[in-house]
Amino acid sequence: MDNPTFAVPGLGYVLAPITAPLALLNPFEGDPYQHHGKVVHFYRSHIRYRAPKLPGQGGSRGDRDQMQDYRPLPKQVKLYLVPALARQEKAELQEREQAAEQQAEVKGLFPEGDNPETKVGLGPAAHSSLEYAGYIRKRVTGLLAEQHQLPDPSVEQKSEYLAALTAHQKQLYYKVAKRENALLWLDQRLSIALPVADELPLSNGLERFWLSNQGKY
């Protein structure tokens, strides 16, 4: 338990209704997620692009906003985002320079140790641990599939989404396009989080995970 009162038998359970809320007022060095590890975000895109309204849909010729319609991109995507991975530098100088802009964008989107300020509203069903666990299993299995020279379905999904962003680039707000490209870049960095072959016993555990889940993604 994080609460030191649990060191005294029975005391922690008596004081928990009081001490638990108080702990939120003074979290670990200002980071309420420190004892849970790195913050992870599950992101589902809901991007719309601007398009002229079709005849008969109304709108005044003198009003630009009324002459435009907003339509969903033909491809959307779900991403697994770990902002901490954006701060891990590559050894190659050229890659660091190319990543600098994306790192700055990610840092602005995800204040360190906190949630993004702009979020799409989620209902209770979206917080199911079964949904999270199922998605994590699919993504980790896909990453391991690449290590076994097999296709990762998420790679094709992200490629199709990037193609949709590119095709409608002029019809998207610049900040939206910049943000989505940065999020795709961050998702792609998941592969560096997997341990290399000589990192035992982690690599053995991942291999057992692969043997149990291959073909289920």
Image (cartoon, grey):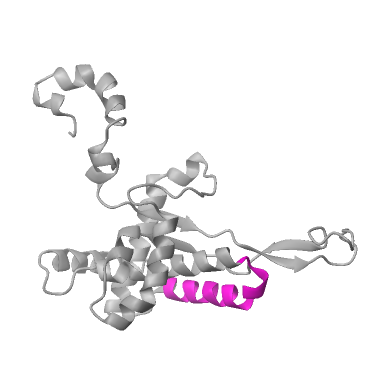
Q: Quadrant of the C terminus?
A: bottom left
Q: Is 63 drawn above or below residue 125 in the view shown?
A: below
Total residue callouts:
0
- Say whether residue 66 is left or right of residue 85: right
Residue 94 screen position, x and y as percent: 32, 83
Residue at 60 percent across and 62 percent down: it is 47
Query: What's the magenta bit mostly, secondary-structure-wise?
Result: helix
Q: Residue 50's image quarter?
A: bottom right
Q: Is 17 drawn above or below residue 90 in the view shown?
A: above
Residue 56 screen position, x and y as percent: 90, 62
Is residue 149 visible to the viewer in this orientation of the structure?
no
Q: Is residue 10 magenta?
A: no
Is residue 152 visible to the viewer in this orientation of the structure?
yes
Residue at 58 percent across and 73 percent down: it is 165
Q: Residue 45's image quarter?
A: bottom right
Magenta span:
154-173
Q: Quadrant of the N terminus?
A: top left
- Say whether residue 69 is left or right of residue 77: right
Q: Nearer the viewer, residue 210 or 52?
A: 52
Residue 198 screen position, x and y as percent: 11, 74
Residue 17 screen position, x and y as percent: 28, 20
Residue at 15 percent across and 64 percent down: it is 202
Residue at 22 percent across and 43 percent down: it is 35
Q: Residue 8's image quarter?
A: top left
- Say whether residue 120 is left or right of residue 34: right
